[in-house]
Image: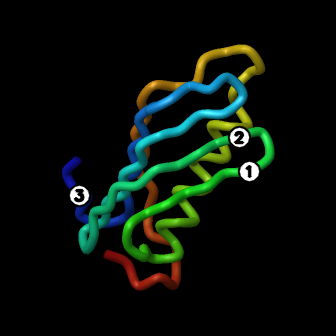
């Protein structure tokens, strides 16, 4: 995934559809850093694991992205296979 000039690009790809829960590969890229990890979405929680520490605002956008997927998924429907999103740098974060 090509890093953006500014902001963050977040991509998810379904690894395992477990019915009520799903495991995703998650990639987050800024102009300064590109990381790949794993995310688990379940009815009660969202877990995100990256191998290195990432900036708080990037984690915030990643968590909100996954939360919107969980919230918008209709019961009994399949989890999305692949989604890509871009978000701007929040004010006060200095920017990329």
* Point 24% across, 68% down: residue: 31
| Res. 22 image quadrant | top right
Question: Disc 3 or disc 2, which is closer to the eye?
Answer: 2
Whether residues under marks 3 and 1 lie with C-beta atoms below 8 angstroms apart, the answer is: no
First in sequence: mark 3 vs mark 1: 3
SS for dot 2: loop
Q: Residues within 10 Å of mark 1 (few under 14, many from 20)?
A: few
Q: Which mark is residue 42?
A: 2
Depicted 2 relative to depicted 79: above or below: below
Q: Which mark is residue 3?
A: 3
* Front residue of this view, candidates 29 and 41: 41
Disc 1 target residue: 45
For the C terminus, which image quadrant?
A: bottom left
Q: CA distance from mark 3 to mark 1?
A: 28 Å
Whether residues under marks 3 and 2 lie with C-beta atoms below 8 angstroms apart, the answer is: no
Q: Residues within 10 Å of mark 2 (few under 14, many from 20)?
A: some
SS for dot 1: loop
Whether residues under marks 2 and 1 lie with C-beta atoms below 8 angstroms apart, the answer is: yes
| Image coordinates for residue 68, horizontal then vertical, percent | 65, 42
């Amino acid at each position: 995934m090509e890093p953006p000039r500014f902001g963050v690009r977040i991509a998810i790809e379904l690894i395992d559809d477990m019915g009520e829960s799903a495991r995703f590969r998650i990639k987050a890229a800024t102009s300064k850093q590109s990381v790949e990890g794993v995310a688990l979405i379940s009815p009660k929680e969202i877990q995100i694991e990256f191998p290195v520490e990432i900036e708080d605002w990037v984690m915030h956008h990643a968590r909100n992205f996954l939360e919107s997927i969980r919230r918008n998924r209709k019961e009994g429907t399949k989890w999305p296979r692949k989604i890509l999103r871009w978000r701007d740098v929040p004010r006060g974060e200095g920017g990329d």
